[in-house]
């Protein structure tokens, strides 16, 4: 049954089994975005609910509990996530930001709200089915808004019996220290470059090395980016970044205004990081296929200006979800970049 996990997760699974003897009431899985944390958490949740787990800890996949889990109607399992992820029924939402698409009209919430945490009360106040275990899976934990985080904290402080919370997050620094202190933290390692490339090639992804580099070594994010409908606009943005002018900035902003801003900011952020890294250490991490052009551009800009531009785009990322005007937001970002040269 080890094939239910990604190849790079096998060792993490073996390490996790050491906790089974004295299972904590809350486990926080953390690691880079796009490495399959949600997939791993699902497998662990199913194994805890399985009525005939295998010797290596995997769920049997055959019992009534496993069948209910596979059909997403196990009575002792609850999944808590933002509304924006409810449209994704792939079983793993840890594919990276490229998976996000533009939403029309009123967009579903990207936060986990207090009502979702309060809704767990009835679930946890009744006896478990067949007197087994109860599992709550919550992800991404950094999507908890303040009210929801405080409500969850109260539950973690006085956990109900036979209940395990499995939380997953990309960034520990975005969680309340009090929540961190109530969880057993468990790091999920990123795959080696070769492991990631092997898996991507099994998915028959062309230019796997290019996509993997752009996504910082995260294979699920790389696959999602390669399959994204935003590839054309991303290529247009990179075309501008290669040859920036004020006129081209305005034309590119017009083209990108319907693209999720977090994606456009992410592409620009990684490009600026490569410029700085090329200038400081002759290392290019995200866009190695444009290495020569990046080195040439890096020679045309002063380091303080580049640092300021990188800080500014980092700040933009924090507000990219709620701009007053998408077009003006992108125009300003691209004009600032063009002014560097």
Image (cartoon, rainbow, N blue to C red):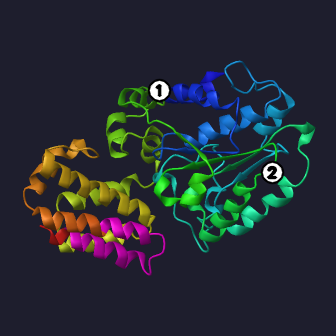
- 319 horizontally vs 250: left or right: right
- 291 horizontally vs 315: left or right: left
Please name the predominant secondary structure of the magenta segment in the image.
helix
Q: Check the image and name the residue furthest to the bottom.
A: 324
Write down the region rendered in magenta. Answer: 313-337
Residue 26, position as x, y percentages in the image: 67, 46
- Does 333 appear in magenta? yes
At x 7% / y 56%, what residue is drawn?
299
Residue 114: image quadrant is bottom right
Closer to us: 98 or 174:
174
Q: Is residue 101 above or below residue 128?
A: below
Residue 103, position as x, y percentages in the image: 56, 66
At x 71% / y 45%, what residue is drawn?
25
- Image quarter where the N terminus lies is top right
The residue labelled by disc 1 is 202
- Does 56 appear in magenta? no
Residue 149, position as x, y percentages in the image: 63, 64
Give the alpha-carbon distance from disc 2 to disc 1, as whole Å: 43 Å
Q: Check the image and name the residue furthest to the top.
A: 55
Residue 160's label in the rendered image is: 2
């Amino acid at each position: 049954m080890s094939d239910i996990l990604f190849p790079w997760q096998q060792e993490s699974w073996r390490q996790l089994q050491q906790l089974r003897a004295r299972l904590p009431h809350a486990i926080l899985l953390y690691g880079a975005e796009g490495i399959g944390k949600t997939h791993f958490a699902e497998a662990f949740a199913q194994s805890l609910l399985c009525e005939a787990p295998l010797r290596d800890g995997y769920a049997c996949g055959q019992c009534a509990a496993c069948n209910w889990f596979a059909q997403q109607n196990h009575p002792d399992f609850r999944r808590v996530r933002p509304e924006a992820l409810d449209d994704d029924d792939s079983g793993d939402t840890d594919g990276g930001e490229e998976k996000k698409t533009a939403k029309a009209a009123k967009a579903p919430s990207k936060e986990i709200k207090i009502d979702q945490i309060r809704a767990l009360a009835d679930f946890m106040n009744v006896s478990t089915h067949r007197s087994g275990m109860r599992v709550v899976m919550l992800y991404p934990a950094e999507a908890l808004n303040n009210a929801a985080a405080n409500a969850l904290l109260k539950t973690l402080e006085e956990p109900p019996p036979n209940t395990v919370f499995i939380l997953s997050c990309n960034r520990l620094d975005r969680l309340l220290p009090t929540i961190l202190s109530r969880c057993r933290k468990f790091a999920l390692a990123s795959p080696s470059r070769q492991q990631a490339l092997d898996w991507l090639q099994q998915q028959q992804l062309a230019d796997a090395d290019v996509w993997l580099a752009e996504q910082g070594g995260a294979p699920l994010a790389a696959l999602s980016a390669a399959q994204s409908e935003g590839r054309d606009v991303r290529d247009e943005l990179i075309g501008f970044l290669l040859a920036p002018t004020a006129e081209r900035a305005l034309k590119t902003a017009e083209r990108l205004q319907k693209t999720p801003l977090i994606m456009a900011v992410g592409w620009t952020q990684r490009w600026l990081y490569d410029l700085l890294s090329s200038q400081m250490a002759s290392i290019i991490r995200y866009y190695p296929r444009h290495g020569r052009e990046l080195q040439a551009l890096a020679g045309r800009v002063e380091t303080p200006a580049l640092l300021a531009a990188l800080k500014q785009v980092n700040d933009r990322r924090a507000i990219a979800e709620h701009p007053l005007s998408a077009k003006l937001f992108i125009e300003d970002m691209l004009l600032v970049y063009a002014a560097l040269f």
